[in-house]
Amino acid sequence: MASEAKVGVRRYENYINGEFCASASGKYFPVIDPSTEEIIAEVPEAGEADVNRAVAAARAAFDSGAWPQTTAQERGRILFRLAERIRKEAASLAELEARNSGKPIVEAEYDIADCATCFEYYGGLATKVLGFVNPVPDNAISLSLKEPIGVAAQIIPWNYPLLMAAWKLAPAIAAGCTCVLKPAEQTPLTALVFAGFLAEAGLPPGVVNIVTGFGETAGAPLVRHPDVNKIAFTGSASVGKQIVKMAADTVKRVTLELGGKSPNIFFADADFEAAIDGALFGVFINQGEVCSAGSRILVEQSIYSKFVEAMAAKAKTIRLGAPLDRETKMGPLVSRDQYERVNSYVALGKTEAKIAAGGERPAKFAKGFYVAPTVFYDVDNSARIAQEEIFGPVAAVIPFANEADAIKIANATPYGLAAAVWSRDIFKAFRVVKALRAGIVWVNHMQPTYVEAPWGGYKQSGFGRELGPFGIDEYLETKQVHINLNEQPIGWY
Ligand code: ADP
Ligand code: MG
């Protein structure tokens, strides 16, 4: 039997087969507000039994044929209704997201609006999935049909909780797949609120199931489950590698987005004010907890000293504060684990490079996982703080001599998610764009992300693309159909 929730602590439930339910073990685990370190909710600790139930529900919804055979128009309408509901509840969703993740409320509001836009985009795209007629050299019609892959397991991180759920659920629903989503254990709340919108929007039971739990005990059984056809994962590189191995046994389709160590490259001819602004925004937005964070800041030698000085001076003025304060630019990190991890990199950085800003716990907070925006400079690209993803507000500024040098340093990383280049010389900027080994490249900006445009990495940042038409393709199989138009026997024997 489930124990009673603590007074004042809201208890949430898993969502399986269209119903909210406890986990089989009856166990719950606490969810923290990272600015106060207080428990704000508890959620079921799902294990293998719950994963099995959720997968069975998803499998039945798919195999009964009812869901994949719904018309694309109907799936589109459901997605539009979900978008509308998200917009209607945007204020409370944003507040819950900010409280649970620590991100500033203003950013949480953008995230929630982006969630709605994502459902709208795939609502529209549902009716625009086209097959092909293949020009085969026979008296026949040859078709390529697009069909849903089946049951998708979707495992997401804690930095953009509901937005990462939207990026995965919306294209899957549009494609006619069924889903089991596992939010990150740190930030499961908005996804569970969203679960409450599904039935009202017209989604049949079992099409989307949401289980909350930890990676080893809920994520891994989901990845290994033989009835799952596809895995979509966003998270750390180390877990991504384990997922590929686990998925191999049943040859599941896998897409991975595994973060990076993205270079933000500044040439001397860039607009200086815009450059400093872009460097800060690129690395400190969302407390630096961004897979595409511009955490390696490459600066041309002739502006290097001035750049470090200006960047450090501005970094010191960034307003840290409570997530729900509208003036806050950076909130706390998501969890004690992440706080300790980031601080250990700050300590390491002090042994590897020089420090121009940050490096101490901001004095004004008695509680909460706050880390000051930290700027290291004279960083060698081979240093650990330049090679390892920190996932916090820590910048490594690296000087470069010329264009060739910038490209060489930028590409000298196992990752390849994103990059940016700042210059007013379009020939130089585009030469660098072509030379960068990254899935997303910005020119004179860093971070804007659009549901219309593909998102994903080169190299060890993963494979597959989310968003845009690419995003729905990852939930579709291609069936080749050959229709013979000769009525006579082929006369083989
Ligand atoms: P972080 O270490 O920053 O929390 P993770 O990659 O561990 O990043 O987490 C991203 C998501 O992957 C979370 O939902 C987490 O629960 C899940 N996860 C972690 N370990 C595993 C695993 N072994 N198998 C499946 N999912 C996992
Ligand atoms: Mg982890």
Image (spheres, rainbow, N blue to C red):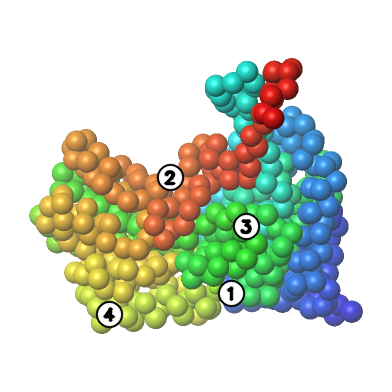
Percent of width and height locating residue 61: 82, 49
SS at circle 1: loop
The span from disc 1 to disc 4 (Cα, nearest Å) is 28 Å
In this rendering, the answer to whether 372 lies above or below 260 is below
Which quadrant is home to the C terminus? top right
Percent of width and height locating residue 303: 14, 54
Task: Give the residue number, with chain letter if any, for mark 3.
Answer: 252
Instruction: Say the numbered circle drawn on residue 350.
Output: 4
User: Going by the image, does 438 lie left or right of 474?
Assistant: left
Residue 422 quadrant:
top left
The span from disc 2 to disc 3 (Cα, nearest Å) is 31 Å
Q: Is residue 112 visible?
A: no
Q: Considering only order in the chain, which callout, 1 or 3, is on the residue closer to the N terminus?
A: 1
Percent of width and height locating residue 84: 70, 38
SS at circle 2: loop
Q: Nearer the viewer, mark 3 or mark 1?
A: 3
In this rendering, the answer to whether 87 lies above or below 383 is above
> Which residue occupies the extreme right position in the image?
1
Q: Quadrant for ligand 2? A: bottom right
User: Residues at badges 3 and 4 in contact (C-beta under 8 Å)?
Assistant: no
Q: Can residue 267 be seen in this view?
A: yes
Dot 2: few (<14), some (14–19), or many (≥20) neighbours within 10 Å?
A: few
User: Going by the image, does 273 lie left or right of 283?
Assistant: left
User: Residue at 39% of width from left, 57% of height from top?
Assistant: 459
User: Residue at 82% of width from left, 42% of height from top?
Assistant: 65
The span from disc 2 to disc 4 (Cα, nearest Å) is 31 Å
Task: Give the residue number, with chain letter if any, for mark 2.
Answer: 448
Instruction: Say the numbered circle drawn on residue 36.
Output: 1
Q: Considering only order in the chain, which callout, 3 or 2, is on the residue closer to the N terminus?
A: 3
Looking at this view, is 74 or 256 the one in front? Answer: 256
The span from disc 3 to disc 1 (Cα, nearest Å) is 41 Å
